[in-house]
Image (spheres, rainbow, N blue to C red):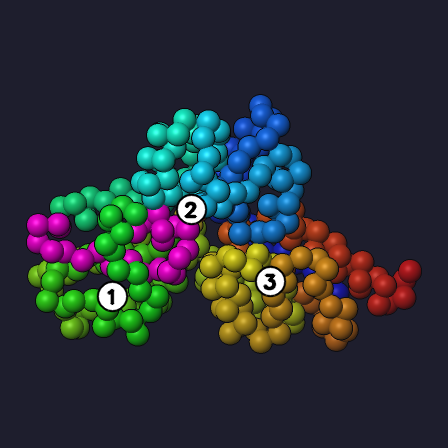
């Protein structure tokens, strides 16, 4: 049986630099607090927790004083930085530079449009950490919409600035932007395509990859937005696609009648986990063929 790993899968630039930064910090300190899961991948969170990374939620953060806290690639709203300044909390900030730039663009669009009543609209997942950080740039005034079906939340008589969460799918963004172009006043509509190409550029590749193998194993944490989106693409292209978060979820039965397996994953899936999955499938194959 052929077992192949997608060369384009694995950490994106922002996640890999955040993980590296956390590892460097943990070499100097035995213990470090991280605000939220450092990546949406349980095995990577567990690996780093063994090195001393302690994941905390926002409720706990807002009770802390005199500590060092690591901020992950998703970014944080201004309230997090303000609280840290007031409570002697040192921040190790690993916000992805692309997210940071988007936060600045949204803040500047919000500030400059205040007098005209401009609405900042973010195409994104409500409650997602990155989206919370973006909404925070607008004093929580931004409207978050998840699809063009929610377009009625936007006041079409006021100016509109449309942005996107970096990991949203391009097709959905274009649908929303096209719909707004049809019904909103063109002179007061600004569309900013802020989707990160580290994710969207993977889509053509993953479509092609899905067709090359009789079974696709997609590896991702359950909380990963881009993991869900990329898996949906795999499933559409190749109905024999399976989603797993850990090696233990591999089912022997899946491999009984296939001659090739492709393994791929999200921008938060460690390359090492993809390799471990490949090795586990290889061992299953040996077992099924009676070699052991
Ligand atoms: S997907 Fe893009 S914006 Fe998001 S962390 Fe990765 S590199 Fe940064």
Is the shortest distance between ligand 1 and the CB of mark 2 under 8 Å? yes
Tell me the tag on residue 2.
none
The percent position of residue 235, horizontal first and vertical second, equals 54, 72
- Mark 1: few/some/many CA within 10 Å (<14, 14-19, 20+): many
Quadrant assignment for the C terminus: bottom right
The percent position of residue 259, horizontal first and vertical second, equals 72, 70
| Tally of marks | 3
- Please name whichever residue, 41 or 68, is drawn nearer the observer in this view of the structure: 68
N-terminal-most mark, 2 or 1 = 2
Quadrant assignment for the N terminus: bottom right
Above-or-below relation of 173 to 79: below
N-terminal-most mark, 2 or 3 = 2
Residue 116 painted magenta = yes
Tell me the tag on residue 218.
3
Where does label 1 land, which residue?
177
Left or right side of 271 for 178: left
The percent position of residue 58, horizontal first and vertical second, equals 45, 45
- Please name whichever residue, 84 or 163, is drawn nearer the observer in this view of the structure: 84
Which residues fall within the magenta stretch? Answer: 113-135
Residue that appears at 67% across and 57% down: 246
Q: CA distance from mark 3 to mark 1?
A: 30 Å
Tell me the element at label 1: helix
N-terminal-most mark, 3 or 1 = 1
- Mark 2: few/some/many CA within 10 Å (<14, 14-19, 20+): many
Identify the image quadrant of residue 171.
Answer: bottom left
Determine the residue located farthest toward the front in the rendered image.
63
Tell me the tag on residue 74.
2
Tell me the element at label 2: loop
């Amino acid at each position: 049986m052929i077992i192949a790993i997608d060369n384009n899968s694995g950490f994106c630039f922002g996640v890999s630099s955040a993980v590296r930064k956390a590892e460097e910090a943990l070499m100097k300190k035995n213990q470090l607090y991280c605000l939220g899961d450092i990546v949406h991948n349980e095995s990577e969170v567990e690996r780093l927790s063994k090195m001393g990374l302690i994941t905390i939620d926002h409720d706990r953060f807002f009770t802390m004083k005199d500590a060092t806290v690591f901020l992950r690639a998703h970014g944080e709203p201004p309230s997090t930085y303000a609280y840290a300044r007031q409570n002697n909390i040192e921040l190790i900030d690993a916000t992805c530079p692309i997210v940071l730039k988007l936060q600045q663009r949204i803040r500047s669009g919000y500030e400059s449009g205040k007098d005209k009543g401009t609405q900042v609209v973010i195409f994104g997942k409500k409650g997602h950490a990155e989206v919370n950080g973006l909404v925070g740039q607008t004093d929580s005034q931004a409207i978050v919409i998840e699809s063009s079906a929610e377009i009625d939340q936007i006041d079409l008589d006021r100016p509109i600035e449309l942005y996107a969460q970096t990991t949203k799918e391009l097709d959905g963004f274009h649908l929303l932007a096209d719909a707004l172009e049809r019904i909103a006043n063109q002179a007061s509509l600004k569309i900013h395509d802020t989707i990160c190409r580290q994710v969207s550029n993977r889509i053509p590749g993953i479509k092609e990859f899905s067709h090359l193998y009789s079974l696709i194993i997609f590896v991702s944490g359950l909380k990963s937005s881009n993991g869900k989106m990329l898996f949906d693409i795999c499933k559409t292209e190749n109905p024999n696609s399976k989603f797993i978060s850990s090696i233990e979820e591999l089912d022997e039965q899946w491999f009984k009648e296939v001659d090739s397996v492709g393994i791929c994953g999200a921008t938060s899936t460690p390359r090492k986990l993809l390799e471990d999955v490949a090795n586990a499938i290889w061992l299953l194959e040996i077992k099924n063929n009676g070699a052991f």
